[in-house]
Amino acid sequence: MTSGIELPELPRDADGPVFAEPWQAQAFAMAVLLHERGLFTWPEWAEALAAELAVETEAAPADHGTAYYRSWLTALERLCITRGVATSGGLARLAMAWQAAAEATPHGRPIVLPPEAQSAAKQ
């Protein structure tokens, strides 16, 4: 990471972070971008992620891939809410909009979120 601060339990190999699914890489990229834009410091991020990992590890201690990035998303959502860039209701509506768009998209086609749903996280 740009700050030199290590993140707890980051799944990685000799080349860097590893992702089992595309959404994990996208979640990683969102956190890096929001950090670069000043939403939170890297120590704040590491603290928020560590807190979520502690909860997740109790629930599913054997899973370090999906559970890790599920914690990553939860920490990111909480920071966005506490920093006022999203609301919990808005994030729930956005998740439902993505689910509906995914279900309506034929296999192999890109999922497109309708324009009216794109600002749902702030509401």
Image (tube, rainbow, N blue to C red):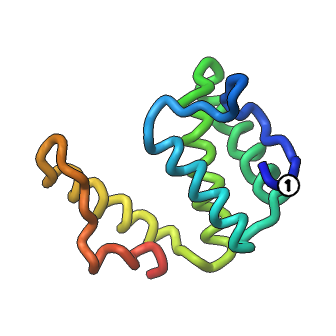
- Residue at 74% x, 37% y: name it: 54
Q: Residue 105: x, y in percent? A: 15, 52
Q: Measured along the vertical axis of the image, is residue 23 above or below residue 81?
A: above
Q: Residue 88: x, y in percent? A: 51, 68
Residue annotated with mark 1: 3
How many neighbours does mark 1 have within 10 angstroms: few (below 14), some (14-19), or many (20 or more)? Answer: few
| Residue at the farthest top position | 62
Quadrant of residue 61 in the image? top right
- Nearest the eye: 48 or 58: 48
Q: The residue tagged with tag 1: helix, strand or loop?
A: loop
Position of 75 compared to 101: left or right? right
Quadrant of residue 8 in the image? top right
Position of 33 compared to 87: left or right? right
Quadrant of residue 60 in the image? top right
- Nearest the eye: 1 or 21: 1
Q: Measured along the vertical axis of the image, is residue 88 above or below residue 53?
A: below
Q: Residue 107: x, y in percent? A: 15, 41
Residue type pointed to by label 1:
Ser
- Residue at 62% x, 69% y: name it: 80
Q: Measured along the vertical axis of the image, is residue 100 above or below residue 87?
A: above
- Residue at 48% x, 79% y: name it: 122
Position of 89 compared to 37: left or right? left
Position of 58 compared to 87: left or right? right
